Image (cartoon, rainbow, N blue to C red):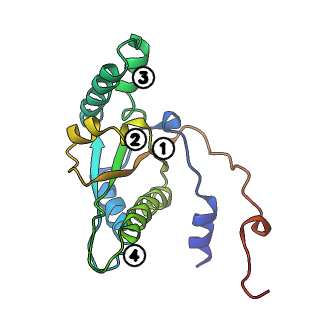
């Protein structure tokens, strides 16, 4: 058990621009997605799914993002459009965690959304356990309906996050964490 705790205590987010190849191999991606799917799921609804962006697919999706950005920002410079084009090419692998939360007679949508968040966190933790680093982001394109449609999301689906995975260029530095006394209360004391 101490190894698992050490793993959890050492997980750090790494900016996508600071992630490099090689990314996970096909079997490792399957392992990551298997672990990501082992989360609480009240009612066994599977209220999430994954979209994997690797290789040239990252660039193809980036073209979509750049085109939508240019449509939304007609005065954008070519450098700005180029930056948007490379949004999903910053890391060797990007996995979109898609929330499929929907009204249900018994299971609140909020619980379904939380399940998608748990899937994203499991994915980040699994990447760390395999020696990779990850960053879970939702940037503007995660909320743009034209981008979501082009990526194949249904009208009721939302992006819980884009998880960028690769090898860290340098060991990640820790950031200050809140002291427990600032974030914990004990009921009845």
Considering depth in this image, is 104 or 134 the residue closer to the camera?
Answer: 104
Give how far apart the Cα atoms at labels 2 and 3 are. 22 Å
Considering depth in this image, is 124 or 83 the residue closer to the camera?
Answer: 83
User: Which numbered disc, 2 or 3, marks the residue closer to the eye?
Assistant: 3
Against 69, residue 146 (above or below) is: below
- Pointer 2 and pointer 4: residues touching (CB < 8 Å)? no
Give how far apart the Cα atoms at labels 2 and 4 are. 31 Å
The numbered dot on residue 167 is: 1
The numbered dot on residue 112 is: none
The numbered dot on residue 83 is: 3
> Which quadrant holds residue 156?
bottom left
Give how far apart the Cα atoms at labels 1 and 4 are. 28 Å
The numbered dot on residue 40 is: 4
> Which quadrant holds residue 99?
bottom left
Along the polypeptide, which appears first: circle 3 or circle 1? 3
State which quarter of the image contains the N terminus. bottom right
Along the polypeptide, which appears first: circle 4 or circle 3? 4
> Does residue 185 appear to the left or right of 92 in the view shown?
right
Going 36% across and 60% down the picture, which residue do you hit?
32
Give how far apart the Cα atoms at labels 2 and 1 are. 7 Å
Along the polypeptide, which appears first: circle 2 or circle 3? 2
- Dot 3 lies on which element? helix
Going 37% across and 42% down the picture, which residue do you hit?
142
State which quarter of the image contains the C terminus. bottom right
- Dot 4 lies on which element? loop
- Pointer 2 and pointer 1: residues touching (CB < 8 Å)? yes
Against 18, residue 133 (above or below) is: below
The residue that mark 2 highlights is 22
Residue furthest bottom in the image? 188
């Amino acid at each position: 058990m101490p190894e698992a705790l050490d793993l959890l205590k050492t997980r750090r987010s790494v900016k996508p621009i600071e992630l490099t190849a090689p990314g996970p191999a096909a079997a490792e991606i399957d392992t990551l997605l298997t672990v990501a799917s082992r989360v609480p799921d009240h009612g066994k609804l599977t209220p999430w799914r994954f979209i994997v962006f690797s290789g040239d697919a990252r660039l193809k999706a980036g073209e979509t993002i750049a085109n939508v950005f240019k449509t939304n920002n007609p005065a954008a410079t070519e450098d700005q459009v180029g930056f948007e084009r490379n949004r999903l090419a910053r890391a060797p692998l990007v996995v979109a965690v898609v929330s499929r939360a929907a009204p249900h007679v018994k299971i609140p949508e909020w619980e379904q959304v939380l399940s998608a968040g748990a899937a994203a966190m499991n994915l980040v933790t699994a990447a760390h356990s395999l020696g990779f680093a990850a960053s879970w982001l939702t940037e503007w394109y995660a909320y743009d309906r034209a981008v979501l449609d082009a990526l194949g999301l249904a009208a009721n689906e939302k992006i819980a996050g884009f998880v960028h995975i690769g090898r860290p260029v340098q060991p990640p530095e820790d950031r200050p964490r809140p002291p427990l006394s600032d974030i914990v209360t004990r009921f009845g004391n």
